[in-house]
Image (tube, rainbow, N blue to C red):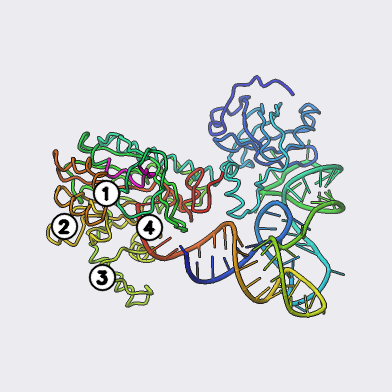
Amino acid sequence: MGTLTAPRAFISGLDEHVGQEVTIKGWLYNLRSSGKILFPQLRDGTGVVQCVALKNTIAPELWEALKGLGQESALAITGTVRADERAPGGYEIDLRTAEVFNEVRDYPITPKEHGTEFLMDHRHLWLRSRRQHAILKVRHTVVKAVRDFLDNDGFTLADSPIFTPAACEGTSTLFEVDYFDGEKAYLTQSGQLYNEATAAAFGKAYCFGPTFRAEKSKTRRHLTEFWMVEPEMAYATLDDVMTLSERMLSYIAARVLDSRAEELKTLERDPARLEAIVPPFPRMHYDDAVKLLHKGHDEGAMETRFEWGGDFGAPDETYLSGNYDKPLMVHHYPAEVKAFYMARDPERNELALGVDVLAPEGYGEVIGGGERATSLQFLEEQIALHQLPKEAFEWYLDLRRYGSVPHAGFGMGIERCTAWMCGIEHVRETIPFPRLMNRLRP
RNA sequence: UCCGCAGUAGCUCAAUGGCAGAGCAUUCGGCUGUUAACCGAAGGGUUGUAGGUUCGAGUCCUACCUGCGGAGCCA
């Protein structure tokens, strides 16, 4: 099948090889033929390029082999790179020779439409499609931006454990693990408490890893297993958290705009949506948010009248954030709907110094955080009040016995953030292998 | 867990209670610039499962299973 002597190139870098002969190693994306001319489109993970093979310029046996190749056949081709307006992508390769590694028949995912269930059952193959490729490239950039932002801002990565002895917040449903002698363990739902320890050690610290929620949630914003980044700062307040949130989110948006323009185009995402994400973000007191919801109800935009004291539902969040093209930061929630470790407003004890950052366009809460309680006595009361096992929290209480200071932090869901950046419907497409209520495979 | 919608060829979908269909995919043939290529032909079905109504059920009824959308809860 001809020798592949030309230097290897990647499709994303073809512009540097115009006029040269190169070898591309990849997979067949699509094949069109017209009797004596073939147009194999090759995909190599960095892009897609159209090749041209003329019957009278290549070996007859190669012609026969290429003609019958099915979608996703693995092959390497050698040919000369040429700029051509007719080709999708702008460059074309005049194929001289090729080597087929794997001949494929009946690739399940065709260039036509498919349903979600079918695609999710074939997630391991679906990842190869243009749209999924683009989404995961954006995810990669979101993750990289988060790490770069925090690293450049003096944060130290100090990851929290996945196995934990107790619920962090005593609210969500946990996955139980039966392994540790005489004691039940759970998969983490937040690295929050551990971050308070690392923040006291490093000043500014963050953890970044998978998180598990056993809730029977079936919405476009929920995964059973998702990734969360949680920065925590010693000697910091609610206000510092809000400032850090808006700085980080705008940094992420700028990085995505900067390095993923091609992918945003593939996803048909309007860049103006991301360009709008610049500080300052609107800040709104919970009381004012409730007033706004009441106004919405009076005007007929909200079906039910919101009661002060509750947490916002998805329609409430969408209504509140609907007035802005930037994330909306709602702060000073009623303490009752927030975690036990939240610091209280010294002026109004019933309010927690917490903030939810609501993304525009109905993407909901992408960040939740706030200032933590510093008083040992207060936390002991809260643990008793929430009927949490005090022994499991002794180490946490040590943080208040030995050098307790005001400190604050937040958690950001990577998938929600990525879905928002991409402008896509559902978070399940923003993680390579999503785990949902009804999905454990592939 | 609750509410709503759906399940027919490998995939996406049609079919008034009356012969089980189309496009794509697959196989074969044609075409020297195709852009989800096109043209011609062929193969492909226990209509989610179990029961019921009916002369007759993909279609109507009951239960169950699976999926989707939403709620609650959350990032």
Q: Is residue A185 above or below residue A318?
A: above
Upstream in sequence: badge 3 or badge 2: 3
A46 left or right of A203 in image:
right
Q: Mark 4 points at which residue?
A: A364
- Kindly identify which chain the residue marked by label 2 belongs to: A
SS type, badge 2: loop
Res. A158 image quadrant: top left
Mark 2 → mark 4, Cα distance in angstroms? 25 Å
Q: Which of B45 and A205 is in front in this view?
A: B45
- Kindly identify which chain the residue marked by label 4 belongs to: A
Three-letter code for the amino acid on which mark 1 is drawn: Pro
Three-letter code for the amino acid on which mark 2 is drawn: Asp
Three-letter code for the amino acid on which mark 4 is drawn: Gly
Give the percent coordinates (x, y) of residue B2. 48, 69
Q: Name the residue under label 3.
A: A291
**Mark 1 or mark 3, whichever is nearer to me:** 1
The disc placed on residue A345 is: 2
**Mark 4 or mark 1, whichever is nearer to me:** 1
Confirm or deny contact between disc 2 and disc 1 (CB under 8 A): no
Mark 2 → mark 1, Cα distance in angstroms? 26 Å
**Mark 3 or mark 2, whichever is nearer to me:** 2
Give a yes or no on whether discs 4 and 3 share a subunit. Answer: yes
Upstream in sequence: badge 1 or badge 3: 3
Give a yes or no on whether discs 4 and 1 share a subunit. Answer: yes
